[in-house]
Image (tube, helix red, strand yellow):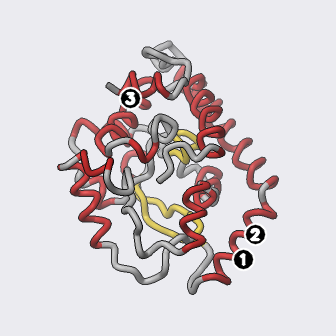
Amino acid sequence: MTIEVAKDARLGTTGPVTDEARPGSVPRRRALSRALDVVVATAVLVVLSPLLAAVALIVRCTSRGPALFRQERLGLSRRPFVMYKFRTMRTGCDDRAHREYVAALLSEPALAGHAGGVYKLADDPRVTRLGRWLRETSIDELPQLINVLKGEMALVGPRPVLPWEAELFGPEHDARFDVPPGITGLWQCSGRNTLTMSQALDLDVEYVRRRSLHLDLAILLRTVPCVLGRVGVR
């Protein structure tokens, strides 16, 4: 199932493409991947610094609270770290409805086709008007480039999850914690919020199994038109 979804994303890989089985390839691949992360993250932060400053100012001016949203997520080997995003919700909101929704998605996958998609409530009242636009354009994710520079995240990898979300996952999804989480990944450019949560988790594991620098580059190239075209956005 997951291979077919990846094919639909036109990533140019239809089978196992991992290069980590070859002797000496793991340290080299990790070094190249880390170098790519640092170079790209630095370049994007520099080029987009005027946009980031403007967004931060508008967030502060349009709703009460800080411009950046900080939240604990689980990274490599389930190590906790603080992830950054532009704040898209009102401060002090109760997250019980969201927790119940995520739990329901795992037990009733069909809900993804009638709600907000993977991880997101449809018409979430906590989200500000500006926040909806930031989410649709994925601009809210750009501060995660700071996490990339700090070595807590990568450009490509599984979605960084909340500790309580990880408790809902089955053992078949443990492999997603064998690599650093990423800003984008296989599921983000293979349907995004049109997928069920189980499909998204399976694609995270599929990415870990097939991980290679070639696949990372293919995902990054595919992410650009997906974001610009708002593919899979609800």
State which mark lies toward you, 1 or 3.
Answer: 1
Q: Amino acid at mark 2?
A: Ala
Q: Amino acid at mark 1?
A: Leu
Label number found at residue 57: 1
Among the 4 quarters of the image, the one containing residue 24:
top right
The residues tagged by marks 1 and 3 sit, at their Cα atoms, a distance apart of 39 Å
- The residue identified by callout 3 is 206
Among the 4 quarters of the image, the one containing residue 48:
bottom right
Q: Nearer the viewer, residue 149 or 85?
A: 85
Which residue is found at the position 54% from the left and 49% from the top?
A: 153
**In the rendering, at what x and y percent does residue 156 appear?**
55, 39
- The residue identified by callout 2 is 53
Residue count near mark 2 (Cα–Cα under 10 Å), binned few <14, some 14–19, many ≥20: few
The residues tagged by marks 3 and 2 sit, at their Cα atoms, a distance apart of 36 Å
Residue extending farthest to the left is: 107
Q: Nearer the viewer, residue 74 or 115?
A: 115
**In the rendering, at what x and y percent does residue 41 appear?**
70, 48
**In the rendering, at what x and y percent does residue 199 appear?**
33, 37
Image quarter hosting the N terminus: top left
Tell me which numbered mark, 3 or 2, is placed earlier along the sequence: 2
The residues tagged by marks 1 and 2 sit, at their Cα atoms, a distance apart of 6 Å
Which residue is found at the position 60% from the left and 27% from the top?
A: 218
Left or right: where does residue 183 sit relative to residue 207? right
Which residue is found at the position 69% from the left and 72% from the top?
A: 56
Tell me which numbered mark, 1 or 3, is placed earlier along the sequence: 1
